[in-house]
Image: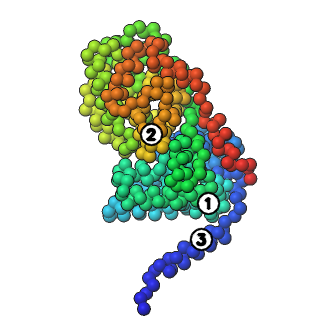
């Protein structure tokens, strides 16, 4: 008779583990404690930091769990109710084929994350960011069984759709990731998502009921006073060429660069203060920055052909895997009237930069077509008009010809830049009109939105 193999023993171990978990499970307690978790860099996860700050504001004890690569916002660091729980980022798993490396990474991350979750004080809720959801959703669910905690998933996008950018939608890993998110996503107690389009998709395709919590700007995203603009530019000048005072540089005159009253007169390529163009990115495959670079080349050509346009200082902020690639492309450009730099800014300086800029550009193209770029939300909080590349549900945020413009390719973006900056820095024209519309919109801020949407889910403190 053939041996039964290892499967009966394996299933016995799984059954024993589940029984142990069910036996260990206790009624939700934890004294109102909440674990806010992201299997990524906490400093580059603003929405999860906002969750932590909102919970702390309501007297909850918060364990903010994730990679501690970039410094979180100082409000997070100063809060007495927020404790950072570091998870070490894995590196060096480069043995064997890529598929084996990925499987090993998932297994090690699972053990590492579960160990971290089970060592902390019992939480009443685990609030988890997705993506990345593999393996964090399953691990958080197991930890929730152990603690008797309720699991809340905050759906920013789908992990499988991001994977499909590299592998294609029919790749086995992508199909497994989609099945995984669908299965384990249903085990959550509550779900948040970032758009109404995603809310509908979660229900139609995953049978997951979610509540839409739009990204909203924090209170410190606002227009920057001139003195703070000047201080920021002087700070940036220490490290970045476009901000260094130089007689031949269009960005040399700091007082002109921070001038907003339009008194500089007609701005031509030879003089006047430059316009400050800002974009931000994670330098990933869902943003094609060659679109912006080609548009800037066209803008340069417009100036050379005699168009009365200001010089540009273009600042692209962020960290990510494709940064070196795009920096290589930038170095090959030969632009006389446009200067580009790609800094990583401290959390406190980023809102100051947006509040000092004249126009924002967004190249985020959602992998699922269902999420919205938080960078645009932050720009709108600073009353900064935006040119954004089109995708399916962008209209939930950017209103074409009202608070910005939507473009389809580099040529259309270049024409929009030319049109917006022709009368710069006059207080007349489209750019000024968009800014005024943003000022008058009196946007809902994060704290107000969170209190209306998330707080009722948490109920009273235990």
Mark 1, residue position = 144
Q: Secondary structure at mark 2?
A: loop
Give the farthest residue toward the front: 204
Contact, mark 3 vs mark 1 (Cβ under 8 Å): no
Q: Residue 321's spot in the image, x, y percent?
A: 37, 45
**Distance from Cα at disc 1 to Cα at disc 2:** 35 Å
Q: Secondary structure at mark 3?
A: helix
Mark 2, residue position = 392
Q: Residue 434's spot in the image, x, y percent?
A: 49, 21
Nearer-N-terminus badge (1/2): 1
At x 27% / y 21%, what residue is drawn? Answer: 301
At x 59% / y 29%, what residue is drawn? Answer: 443
Mark 3, residue position = 18
Give the farthest residue toward the bottom: 1
Q: Nearer the viewer, mark 1 or mark 2?
A: 2
Please identify the quadrant where the N terminus is shown. bottom left
């Amino acid at each position: 008779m053939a041996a039964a193999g290892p499967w009966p023993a394996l299933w016995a171990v799984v059954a024993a583990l589940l029984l142990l978990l069910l036996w260990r499970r206790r009624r939700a307690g934890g004294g109102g404690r909440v674990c806010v978790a992201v299997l990524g860099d906490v400093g580059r996860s603003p929405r999860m930091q906002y969750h932590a700050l909102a919970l702390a504001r309501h007297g909850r004890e918060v364990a903010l769990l994730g990679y501690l690569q970039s410094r979180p916002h100082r409000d997070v660091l100063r809060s007495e109710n927020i404790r950072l729980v570091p998870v070490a980022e894995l590196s060096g798993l480069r043995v064997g084929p890529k598929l084996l490396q990925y499987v090993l990474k998932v297994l090690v991350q699972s053990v590492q994350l579960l160990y971290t979750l089970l060592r902390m004080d019992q939480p009443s809720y685990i609030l988890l960011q997705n993506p990345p959801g593999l393996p964090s959703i399953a691990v958080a669910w197991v930890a929730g069984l152990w603690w008797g905690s309720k699991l809340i998933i905050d759906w920013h996008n789908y992990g499988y759709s991001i994977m499909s950018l590299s592998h294609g939608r029919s790749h086995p890993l992508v199909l497994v990731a989609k099945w995984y998110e669908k299965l384990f996503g249903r085990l959550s107690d509550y779900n948040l998502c970032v758009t109404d389009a995603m809310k509908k998709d979660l229900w139609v395709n995953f049978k997951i009921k979610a509540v839409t919590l739009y990204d909203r700007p924090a209170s410190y995203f606002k227009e920057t006073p001139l003195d703070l603009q000047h201080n920021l530019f002087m700070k940036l000048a220490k490290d970045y060429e476009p901000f260094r005072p130089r007689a031949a540089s269009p960005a040399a005159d700091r007082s002109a660069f921070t001038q907003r009253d339009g008194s500089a007169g007609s701005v031509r390529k030879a003089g006047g203060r430059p316009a400050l163009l800002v974009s931000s990115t994670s330098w990933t495959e869902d943003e094609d920055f060659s679109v912006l670079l080609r548009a800037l080349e066209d803008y340069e050509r417009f100036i050379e052909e005699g168009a009365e346009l200001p010089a540009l200082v273009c600042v692209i902020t962020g960290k990510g895997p494709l940064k070196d690639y795009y920096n290589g492309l930038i170095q090959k450009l030969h632009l006389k009237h446009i200067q580009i730099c790609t800094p990583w800014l401290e959390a406190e300086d980023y809102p100051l930069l947006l509040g000092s800029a004249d126009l924002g550009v967004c190249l985020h193209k959602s992998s699922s077509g269902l999420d919205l770029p938080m960078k645009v939300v932050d720009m709108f909080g600073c009353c900064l008009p935006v040119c954004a590349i089109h995708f399916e549900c962008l209209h939930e945020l950017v209103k074409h010809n009202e608070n910005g413009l939507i473009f389809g390719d580099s040529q259309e973006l270049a024409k929009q830049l030319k049109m917006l900056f022709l009368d710069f820095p006059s207080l007349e024209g489209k750019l000024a009109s968009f800014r005024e519309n943003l000022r008058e919109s009196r946007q809902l801020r994060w704290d107000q939105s969170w209190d209306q949407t998330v707080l009722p889910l948490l109920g009273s403190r235990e």
